[in-house]
Image (cartoon, rainbow, N blue to C red):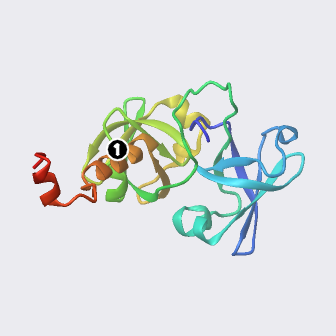
């Protein structure tokens, strides 16, 4: 579990193999506080540390991860957002983020409005239908407040601080980006779908009539 508050920006230093893909990332993160087997979110995608050194960590991404996220598109020297898993007792400054990417979105709007960068990301219906204005969304591992939802486009505003401490400052039109919807939306959708499904009682209509219930 994560919060969507990026700890630092790392740089991809090595890519090996394909299935699984081994990704080595250099960063300023204190790896002495990271154990093998720990979870770290890379651009919002939860991966397991399989190897580490003083200034780098190596992860393995399986086929499912590469199919559903942008991890397979990483390039050497590319910067990525990093966040270690939430510890019990930590401040929850962003929102609850699972690190399980729902979809790959694409930047459709990217323009400065005063000091704010206005960004619109086109997402699948499975994400847009459970996303609400003033709710939460995670873009490349960054917890953001949704400013507006217009059909398949989700809009957010990036303040200078967010751009400074994450990779979102380099967003470009058409860029693929990892998107995780607010998990509360997923649970509400599931609950409503369950409530709309008739529940079979195993009692016949005639039995209910005989007992005065129908």
Please tell me which residue is depicted at 82% across the width and 38% down the height of the picture.
30
Q: Is residue 14 above or below residue 153?
A: below
Can residue 173 be seen from the camera position used here? yes
Residue under numbered circle 1: 131
- Quadrant of the rendered image containing residue 112: top left
Please tell me which residue is depicted at 88% across the width and 39% down the height of the picture.
32
Seen in the image, is 174 located left or right of residue 97? Answer: left
Picture coordinates of residue 35, whole percent (x, y): 84, 45
Q: Secondary structure at mark 1?
A: loop
Given residues 41 and 1, the one toward you in this image is 1
Quadrant containing the N terminus is: top right
- Quadrant of the rendered image containing residue 85: top right
Picture coordinates of residue 177, whole percent (x, y): 49, 55
| Residue furthest bottom in the image | 18
Q: Is residue 135 above or below residue 153?
A: above
Picture coordinates of residue 159, whole percent (x, y): 47, 30
Given residues 107 and 61, the one toward you in this image is 61
Q: How many marks?
A: 1
Seen in the image, is 202 located left or right of residue 66? Answer: left
| Residue furthest front in the image | 210
Picture coordinates of residue 51, whole percent (x, y): 85, 56
Can residue 122 be seen from the camera position used here? no
Q: Is residue 17 above or below residue 196?
A: below
Q: How busy is the neighbourhood of tag 1: few (under 14 within 10 Å), some, or many (20 plus)?
A: many
Given residues 59 and 107, the one toward you in this image is 59
């Amino acid at each position: 579990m994560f919060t969507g508050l990026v700890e630092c920006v790392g740089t991809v230093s090595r890519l090996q193999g394909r299935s699984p893909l081994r990704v080595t990332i250099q960063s300023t993160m204190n790896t002495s506080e990271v154990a093998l087997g720990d979870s770290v979110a890379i651009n919002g995608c939860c991966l397991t540390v399989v190897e580490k050194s003083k200034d780098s960590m190596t992860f393995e991404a399986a086929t499912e991860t590469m199919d559903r996220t942008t991890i397979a598109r990483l390039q050497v020297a590319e910067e990525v957002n990093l966040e270690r898993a939430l510890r019990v007792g930590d401040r929850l400054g962003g929102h609850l983020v699972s690190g399980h990417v729902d979809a790959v979105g694409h930047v459709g709007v990217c323009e400065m409005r005063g000091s704010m960068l206005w960004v619109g990301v086109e997402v699948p219906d499975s994400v847009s239908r459970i996303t609400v204005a003033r709710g939460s969304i995670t873009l490349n591992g960054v917890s953001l407040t949704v400013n507006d939802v217009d059909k398949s486009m989700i809009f957010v505003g990036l303040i200078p601080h967010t751009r400074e401490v994450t990779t979102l400052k380099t967003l470009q039109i058409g860029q693929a980006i990892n998107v995780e919807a607010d998990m509360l939306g997923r649970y509400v959708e599931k609950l409503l779908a369950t409530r709309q499904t008739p529940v079979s009682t195993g009692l016949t209509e005639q039995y209910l009539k005989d007992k005065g219930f129908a």
